[in-house]
């Protein structure tokens, strides 16, 4: 089983940006944590982070062509604005989980809209980096097993 972990804008700044919302863990900490978790479960994890909307679209499309089985995506602020990311997820028709480190539902009004949600079978919010591990587990279950 091969999954893609796609992170959007400013998630490369984890550990520096607003620790009251996103904690102290860095992007590299996230990669290490998810890598270890996936290794244990025999899942191949491919990581990608970009601050650019079109590059994120390209990465989602790549998933269709390279045998990716499922997607974990935290689109960052593009969650709340991007029809292009929604369309990309719908195009590839792979099972996807939306993750947010913070509890977006308790934050500003503009964070209450998620365009990508309509293309995801599950949304996880407010669990910090653990949310990504929970997303991997949900994907593995959805895909029917660990390998
Ligand atoms: C975020 C929440 C978004 O509203 C914000 O723009 C982010 C991070 C989260 O992980 O909690 O960049 O997706």
Image (cartoon, rainbow, N blue to C red):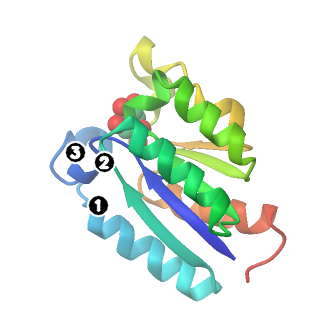
Q: Secondary structure at mark 3?
A: helix
Ranked by sequence position, the earlier of labels 3 and 1 is 3
116 and 27: which one is in front?
116
Camera-side mark, 3 or 2: 2
Figure quarter occupied by ligand 1: top left
Which residue does the numbered mark 1 point to in the structure image?
Answer: 27
Say whether mark 2 is within 8 Å of ligand 1.
yes
Which residue lies at the image location 65% right of the left edge and 62% below the top edge?
A: 65
Q: Secondary structure at mark 1?
A: helix
**Quadrant (top left, top right, bottom left, bottom right) of the C terminus:** bottom right
Does the rendering let one see residue 7? yes
Where is residue 73 drawn, in percent x and y?
A: 53, 49
Q: Secondary structure at mark 2?
A: helix
61 and 131: which one is in front?
61
**Residue found at the very far front of the displayed protein:** 65
Where is residue 123 drawn, in percent x and y?
A: 63, 41
Q: Quadrant of residue 116?
A: top right
Answer with left or right where residue 54 lies relative to residue 5.
left
Which residue does the numbered mark 2 point to in the structure image?
Answer: 11
Where is residue 111 drawn, in percent x and y?
A: 44, 21
Mark 1 near mark 2, Cβ–Cβ under 8 Å? yes
């Amino acid at each position: 089983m091969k999954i893609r972990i796609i992170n959007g804008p400013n998630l490369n700044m984890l550990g520096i940006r607003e620790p009251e919302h996103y904690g102290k863990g860095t992007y590299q900490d996230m990669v290490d944590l998810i890598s270890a978790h996936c290794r244990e479960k025999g899942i191949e994890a491919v990581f990608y982070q970009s601050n650019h909307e079109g590059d994120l679209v390209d990465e989602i499309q790549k998933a269709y062509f390279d045998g990716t089985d499922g997607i974990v995506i935290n689109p960052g602020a593009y969650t709340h604005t991007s029809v292009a990311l929604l369309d990309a997820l719908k195009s590839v028709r792979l099972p996807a989980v939306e993750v947010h480190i913070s509890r977006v539902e308790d934050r500003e009004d503009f964070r209450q809209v998620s365009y990508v949600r309509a293309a995801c079978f599950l949304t996880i919010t407010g669990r910090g980096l653990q949310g990504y591990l929970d997303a991997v587990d949900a994907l593995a279950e959805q895909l029917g097993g660990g390998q």
